Image (cartoon, helix red, strand yellow):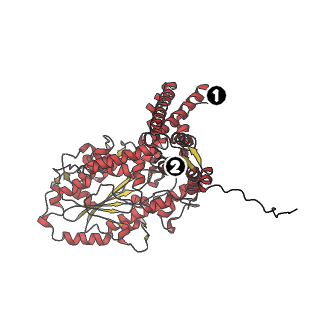
């Protein structure tokens, strides 16, 4: 008997690579994938929409559960519908990958700072510079994105799209669109009365539905900018010309207009804040005969720089607010330059938002002020570091004035101010007086007290910058007639009602985001040359006086510089009722 050596193990046949790859994937149709991702967004990215929509409702009331269910169906069906309009088996995975990542970032900022992703906020995001963007990156943000984008992307990568014949695919897609529309209509009709009331009284909450909010806002912003880019800026104030007082100037005249950033009136020492955040300005105000005027009730034109800056320099203002008109027409600076005023913009932030387009401008970061800059970020003292040099040049140019007229100057300085969230980066160590101060870019890692301390320290530094500016101009009063106007573009939330930073839609914005500090100072020579009774003007700042608005700035600056135009509305010129008779021109 022959015994063969057959104890050798038998190797099972190896599955083809394509079969192994198939086993590792998740088969799904395009429609199934859209439903899954939309459901994920409804649950994971829309918490703040549901909180806002259900605010004031008690879950002891059965109708509240019905309303909540209708809102979930509405959000789910809305995103299914929108995605089904554009997704096919070739584009669905790249499209969803981009939206999943963007939605993770969007939900983080909504959760961390309470922002609404409306067109204005999206425009702000598009204008964010690299330094500002870097300050918003934190470990908590990266962890959030890893969880809410990394894990879904890992699953999306495993999905294998199941192909269908094109006729069947078209029928299924039309059926999905029809079901999505019916679901939206049914959910709205089921709760029509409370839903219509909610949308009528709180239109802003639609900008909490994510990702539809930022997709719509981005499209709206890009469309508006594309439309605006095709149209030339509309010239206004073509009749602007020098007033009769120009010929009477015996010295160079300059108005320094400082645009503050994110300073809120509630924390401004001159306004009666419990802390003295403006000690140096308070000392100037206490001097006998001081011309420093602090306006205690000032309303901003917007809650973010992208809105407020163009608005405050527009003749349209908040009272007739029309964003397209404001962005599409000349600013105050263009009108003044047309009349002959020397205009120059100096920036220490993210630009002039079109206000100084085509006019002389520079940036503190390019001036390389010694000891004041680190990378692209500079301290605000860089705005005034070369002030004496600029004044010397102005005096030298004015020694032989053209045609016997001394042309007034408007120098604008755009602060970095209290720009958040990194308030601690806005001031040098010498101004770290309120402690402990938050020294984190992520405000969630700090207590409310620490955040407020850092914010107030930044105001102390602004106080120093403004007081130094006034002191330098006062020291040159025999050579230059000068005035200073300071006003912040908008305020800031520091954790009140769970809100941080700014940018809440104006209609629902808290006072801390819309009420801002403002002050004016003038040398005695400037007040005389401008023909303004400064004691009379001070009455405009008493507590019983009507509120001051950004709308007043356009007309007040024109009045102080004596520029005549049909655009000038005396009722909005704060100095109009304090005007003194013009003196006869002096011989030169």
Residue labelled with disc 2: 100
Q: Residue furthest bottom?
A: 370
Whole-Å distance between the Cαs marked 2 and 1? Answer: 35 Å
Q: Quadrant of the C terminus?
A: bottom left
Q: Nearer the viewer, residue 204 or 41?
A: 41
Q: Secondary structure at mark 2?
A: helix
Position of 525 relative to 539 (above/below): below
Residue 493 relative to residue 154: left or right = left
Residue 510 is situated, as x and y percent measured from the top left of the image, at 47, 43
Could you say which quadrant of the image residue 3 lies in? Answer: bottom right
Number of the label disc, if any, that sits on residue 60: 1
User: Considering only order in the chain, which callout, 1 or 2, is on the residue closer to the N terminus?
Assistant: 1
Residue 258 is situated, as x and y percent measured from the top left of the image, at 35, 59
Observer able to see residue 494: no
Q: Nearer the viewer, residue 20 or 118?
A: 20
How many residues crowd mark 2 within 10 Å: few (<14), some (14–19), many (20+)?
Answer: many
């Amino acid at each position: 008997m022959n015994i063969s050596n057959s104890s050798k193990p038998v190797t099972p046949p190896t599955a083809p690579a394509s079969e192994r790859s198939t086993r590792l994937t998740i088969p799904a149709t395009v429609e199934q994938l859209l439903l899954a991702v939309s459901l994920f967004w409804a649950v994971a990215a829309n918490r703040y929409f549901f909180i806002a929509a259900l605010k004031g409702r008690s879950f002891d009331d059965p109708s509240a559960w019905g309303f909540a269910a209708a809102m979930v169906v509405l959000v789910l069906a809305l995103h299914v519908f929108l995605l089904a309009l554009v997704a096919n088996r070739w584009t669905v995975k790249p499209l969803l990958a981009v939206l999943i990542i963007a939605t993770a970032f969007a939900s983080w900022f909504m959760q961390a700072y309470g922002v609404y992703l409306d067109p204005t906020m999206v425009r702000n995001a598009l204008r964010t510079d690299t330094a500002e963007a870097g300050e918003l990156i934190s470990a908590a943000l990266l962890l959030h994105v890893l969880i809410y984008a990394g894990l879904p992307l890992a699953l999306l990568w495993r999905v294998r799209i199941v192909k269908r014949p094109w006729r069947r695919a078209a029928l299924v897609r039309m059926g999905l669109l029809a079901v999505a529309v019916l679901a939206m209509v049914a959910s709205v009709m089921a709760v029509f009365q409370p839903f219509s009331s909610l949308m009528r009284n709180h239109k802003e909450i639609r900008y909490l539905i994510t990702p539809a909010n930022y997709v719509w806002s981005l499209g709206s912003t890009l469309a508006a900018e594309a439309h605006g880019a095709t149209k030339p800026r509309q010239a206004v104030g073509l009749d602007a010309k020098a007033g009769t007082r120009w010929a009477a100037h015996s010295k160079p005249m300059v108005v320094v207009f400082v645009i503050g950033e994110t300073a809120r009136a509630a924390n401004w020492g001159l306004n009666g804040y419990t802390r003295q955040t403006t000690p140096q300005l308070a000392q100037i105000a206490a001097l006998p005969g001081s011309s420093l005027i602090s306006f205690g009730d000032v309303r901003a034109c917007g809650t973010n720089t992208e809105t407020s800056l163009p608005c405050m320099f527009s003749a349209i203002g908040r009272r007739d607010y029309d964003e397209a008109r404001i962005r599409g027409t000349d600013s105050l600076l263009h009108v003044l330059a047309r009349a002959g005023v020397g205009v120059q913009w100096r920036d220490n932030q993210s630009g002039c938002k079109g206000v100084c387009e085509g006019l002389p401008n520079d940036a503190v970061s390019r001036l390389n002020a010694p000891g004041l800059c680190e990378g692209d970020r500079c301290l605000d003292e860089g705005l005034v570091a070369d002030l004496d040099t600029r004044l010397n040049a102005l005096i030298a140019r004015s020694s032989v004035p053209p045609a016997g007229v001394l042309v007034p100057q408007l120098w604008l300085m755009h602060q970095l101010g209290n720009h958040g969230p990194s308030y601690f980066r806005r001031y040098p160590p010498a101004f770290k007086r309120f402690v402990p101060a938050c020294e984190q870019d992520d405000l969630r890692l700090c207590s409310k007290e620490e955040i407020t301390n850092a914010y107030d320290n930044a105001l102390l530094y602004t106080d120093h910058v403004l007081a130094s500016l006034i002191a330098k101009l006062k020291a040159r009063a025999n050579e230059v007639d000068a005035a200073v106007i300071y006003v912040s573009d908008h305020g800031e939330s520091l954790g009140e009602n769970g809100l941080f930073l700014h940018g809440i839609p104006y209609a629902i914005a808290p006072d801390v985001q819309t009420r801002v500090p403002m002050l004016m100072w003038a040398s005695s020579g400037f007040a005389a040359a401008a023909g303004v009774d400064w004691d009379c003007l001070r009455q405009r700042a008493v507590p019983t006086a009507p509120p001051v608005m950004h709308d007043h700035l356009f007309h007040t600056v024109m009045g102080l510089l004596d520029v005549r135009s049909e655009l000038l509305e005396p009722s909005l010129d704060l100095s109009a009722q304090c005007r003194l008779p013009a003196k006869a021109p002096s011989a030169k």
